[in-house]
């Protein structure tokens, strides 16, 4: 197995073009486990750790731009006020050691349906910036996930950054696991309120072949909030509205039975998570009036 260690982003992109089968190595929290258990044996490892620009974040043109190797620990400590939903998800990931190594870009590259950052990225309408020697392009997160551990990345492309609109409304995330920490989600859910556009976005994890949005639930809630004047009044949400939102969110899932939980349990749990996260997000919206 070759080990490639480019010193710059341009060198990394060139190396990936020359060896498209090379597996990018940043945190390695997923990749090295697969290699150690002999589940994967790439032709080469492409070490992205020396490229400092990938491990930083910035604000550009009204967007928060998170470098591909920015670790979860820094999302929590440096972006908790700007991206609270993503910070919430980051806190649930692994151990402190994993959070110091793992990154949003790595989570996207793995494209696991159970990835904890995916529901929040869907809810926040993120965009994935990728690049190859052929040029760069932006992929909307809705179009990024193609199947279990399959993404829209071309073989010669690398993830450079994740772009998230700044100044969005409240965002909440929750997940269910077989224990409280260091656990793969049985299911997870995120909801983001976008008052400026009168819209709602969601994300579901670990309950379909890919991370998905609960589009019927989004349309229902946005319509109800507009029709009842709740966006303007910020009045308390009727219990029935939150309950119906939860039912529709659960209906968007396509879960399976596996060692972590049954399909029916996942649907039931998602209804509860959706109702709770909506209640928390709406309370936050009311308090920031």
Image (cartoon, rainbow, N blue to C red):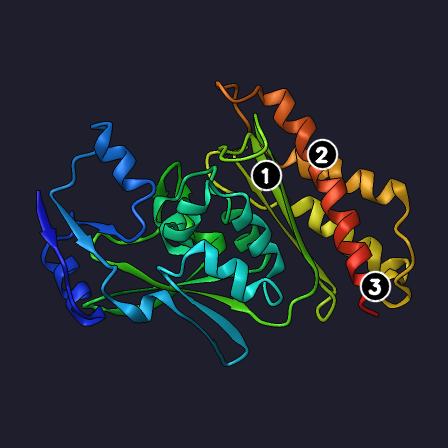
Compared to 72, does 187 lie above or below? Answer: above
Query: Looking at the image, is mark 1 or mark 2 earlier in the sequence?
Result: 1
Q: CA distance from mark 2 to mark 3?
A: 25 Å
Q: Earlier in the sequence, mark 2 or mark 3?
A: 2
- The residue located at (87%, 60%) in the rendering is 230
Which secondary structure, mark 3? helix
Q: The N terminus is located in which quarter?
A: top left
Residue carrying label 2: 271
Q: Nearer the viewer, mark 1 or mark 2?
A: 1
Q: Secondary structure at mark 1?
A: strand
Task: From the image, tell me which residue sits under label 1.
Answer: 188
Q: CA distance from mark 1 to mark 2?
A: 11 Å
In percent of width and height, residue 273 lies at 70, 38
Residue depicted at 55% across the width and 78% down the height: 62
Q: Is residue 286 above or below residue 112?
A: below
Q: Which residue, as the protein is rendered here, is positioned at the far bottom?
A: 61
**What residue did someone put label 3 on?**
287
């Amino acid at each position: 197995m070759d080990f490639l260690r480019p010193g710059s982003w341009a060198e990394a992109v060139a190396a990936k073009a020359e060896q498209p089968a090379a597996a990018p190595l940043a945190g390695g929290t997923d990749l090295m486990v697969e290699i150690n258990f002999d589940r994967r044996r790439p032709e080469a490892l492409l070490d992205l750790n020396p490229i400092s620009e990938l491990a930083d974040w910035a604000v550009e043109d009204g967007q928060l731009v998170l470098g591909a190797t920015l670790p979860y620990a820094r999302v929590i400590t440096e972006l908790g006020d700007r991206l609270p939903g993503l910070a919430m998800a980051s806190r649930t990931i692994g151990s402190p050691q994993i959070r110091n190594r793992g990154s949003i870009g790595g989570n996207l590259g793995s494209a696991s349906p159970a990835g904890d950052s995916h529901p929040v990225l869907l809810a926040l309408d993120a965009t994935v910036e990728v690049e190859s020697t052929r040029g760069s392009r932006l992929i909307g997160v809705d179009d990024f996930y193609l199947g279990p551990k399959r993404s829209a990345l071309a073989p010669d492309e690398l993830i450079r950054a994740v772009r998230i609109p700044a100044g969005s409304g409240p965002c909440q995330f929750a997940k269910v696991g077989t224990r409280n920490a260091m656990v793969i989600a049985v299911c997870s859910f995120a909801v983001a309120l976008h008052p400026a556009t009168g819209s709602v976005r969601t994300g579901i994890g670990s309950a379909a072949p890919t991370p998905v949005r609960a589009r019927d639930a989004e349309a229902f809630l946005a319509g109800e909030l507009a029709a009842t004047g709740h966006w303007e009044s910020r009045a308390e949400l009727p219990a029935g509205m939150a309950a119906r939102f939860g039912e529709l969110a659960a209906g968007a899932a396509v879960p399976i039975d596996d060692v972590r939980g049954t399909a029916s349990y996942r649907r039931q749990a998602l209804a509860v998570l959706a109702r709770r996260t909506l209640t928390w997000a709406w309370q936050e919206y009311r308090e920031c009036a």
